[in-house]
Image (tube, grey):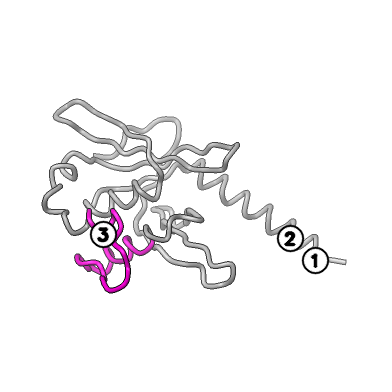
């Protein structure tokens, strides 16, 4: 069930791509492709989330062992069948807040506990991982997407002005 619509339009994420930006400095990001064709990017996400999301997308249920230590995301992926109850209660994730003093986003994970709804404020990358783990929808505030595009446009224009003689 989609989240209740408010005055803020919510855009559903059609796909999730987790990667490391190849150009230095290498930055781990999550890119959400939205239903209106635009993208919403979360920068500087934990590297472990990028790895875990890529394992989920590739269908790898067993983390690559070897010299690497496992993360909580590896454990959750491995024990998915044991925590199915959590997945049954998770309805969706919504990224709809930003703290303008820190420029950090907040996501809300919505759980239906038999008619009692519980909303947990979470780190967006963690909420996205849960949603992907249990194949639940992810929504992003159109307002935040618009603001991110405007910020990136202004930053690009400023950078071009600095280069011009």
Which image quarter is the N terminus in? top left
Kindly indicate the quadrant of the structure image that contains residue 25.
bottom right
Q: Nearer the viewer, residue 7 or 132?
A: 132
Q: Which residue is mark 1?
A: 163
Residue extending furthest right?
165
x, y percent for residue 29: 47, 60
**Crowding at mark 1 (Cα within 10 Å: few <14, some 14-19, many 20+):** few
Residue farthest along the top direction in this orientation: 116
Residues rendered magenta in the picture: 50-76
Name the element at disc 3. Answer: helix
Residue 5 pos. (x, y %)? 36, 33
Q: Residue at x 51, y 47 (%)?
A: 145
Q: Quadrant of the C terminus?
A: bottom right
Per the image, is 72 magenta? Answer: yes
Front residue (pair 34, 148)? 148
Residue 154, position in %: x, y?
68, 52
- Please state which of the two labelled residues, at mark 2 or mark 3, is closer to the viewer: 3
Q: Is residue 54 above or below residue 111?
A: below
Whichever of labels 3 and 1 marks the residue nearer the N terminus, that label is 3
**In the rendered image of this protein, does residue 157 appear above or below residue 143?**
below
Q: Quadrant of residue 152?
A: bottom right
Q: Earlier in the sequence, mark 2 or mark 3?
A: 3
In 3D space, how far apart are the residues under numbered discs 3 and 1 (Cα atoms)?
45 Å
Where 154 falls versus 93 (above or below)? Answer: below
Give SS at disc 2. helix
- On the image, numbered disc 3 is attached to which residue? 74
Say whether marks 2 and 3 touch (CB < 8 Å).
no
Q: Which mark is residue 159?
A: 2
| Residue 72 placement, left or right of 161 | left
**Picture disc at residue 128:** none
Marks 1 and 2: CB-CB under 8 Å?
A: yes
Q: Would you call the spot at circle 2 few (<14 residues within 10 Å), some (14-19), or many (20 or more)?
A: few
């Amino acid at each position: 069930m989609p989240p209740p619509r408010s005055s803020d339009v919510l855009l559903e994420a059609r796909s999730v791509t987790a990667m490391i930006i190849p150009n230095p400095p290498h930055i781990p990001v999550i890119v959400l492709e939205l239903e209106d064709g635009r993208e919403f990017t979360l920068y500087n996400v934990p590297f472990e989330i990028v790895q875990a999301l890529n394992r989920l997308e590739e269908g790898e249920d067993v983390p690559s062992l070897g010299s690497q230590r496992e993360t909580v995301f590896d454990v959750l992926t491995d024990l998915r069948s044991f925590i199915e109850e959590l997945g049954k209660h998770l309805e969706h994730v919504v990224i709809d807040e930003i703290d303008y003093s820190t420029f950090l986003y907040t996501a809300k994970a919505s759980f239906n506990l038999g008619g009692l709804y519980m909303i947990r404020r979470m780190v967006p990358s963690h909420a996205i991982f849960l949603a992907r783990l249990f194949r639940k929808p992810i929504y992003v505030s159109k307002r935040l997407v618009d603001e991110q595009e405007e910020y990136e446009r202004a930053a690009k224009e400023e950078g071009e002005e600095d280069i011009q003689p």
